[in-house]
Image (cartoon, rainbow, N blue to C red):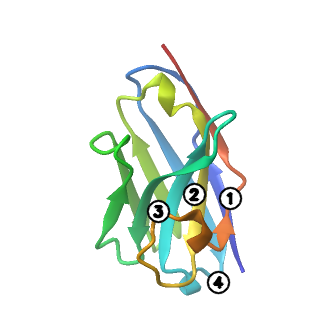
Amino acid sequence: QVQLVESGGGSVQAGDSLRLSCAASGRTSSTYRMGWFRQAPGKERDFVAAITWSATNTYYADSVKGRFTISRDNAKNTLYLQMNSLKPEDTAVYYCAAAKYLSTRYYDQLMYSYWGQGTQVTVSS
């Protein structure tokens, strides 16, 4: 089992930055890819970004490309999401996820086995 705990959410103004963290514990060596998803009120949970175990490859949703950066520190078992130039439409609960099987469908939440409890990000205009 892998436990994931997000932190770093908050309320900011449009144009501000935030960095989310996700601390992993347990059998972290069994995970391949990690990712961030978000769910806005009344909407489905959407893919935001993903990163492979070695951090060789990163993937982003078009809506955040160029503004968000995903990274990981395997020595600290921590995943990060640096969010710059935040917009009101980025307001959502952000979830950290880990996949224990290899898959090319990095955007598909069904490919992820472990999830954090989420952290709220609110961006006001």
Q: Which residue is mark 4?
A: 27
57 with respect to 61 (left or right): left
Query: Mark 3: which amino acid?
Result: Tyr
Q: Residues under labels 3 and 1: Cα distance?
A: 17 Å
Q: Nearer the viewer, mark 3 or mark 1?
A: 3
Q: Which residue is mark 1?
A: 116
Q: Nearer the viewer, mark 2 or mark 1?
A: 1
Which of the two labelled residues, at mark 3 and mark 1, occupies the earlier sequence position? 3
Compared with residue 3, is residue 11 higher up or lower down, i.e. above or below?
above
Tag 3 and tag 4, C-beta contact below 8 Å:
no
Instruction: Find residue 98 and name its label.
Output: none
Quarter-of-image position of residue 115 = bottom right
Q: Nearer the viewer, mark 3 or mark 4?
A: 3
Among all residues in the image, which is located at the extreme top? 125
Count residues near mark 3 (Cα–Cα under 10 Å), then give few for <14, some for 14-19, many for 20+. Answer: many
Compared with residue 25, is residue 124 higher up or lower down, i.e. above or below?
above
Residue at left offset 47%, top offset 74%: 33
Instruction: Find residue 107 and name its label.
Output: 3
Determine whether the residue tagged by mark 2 lies in a helix, strand or loop.
Answer: strand
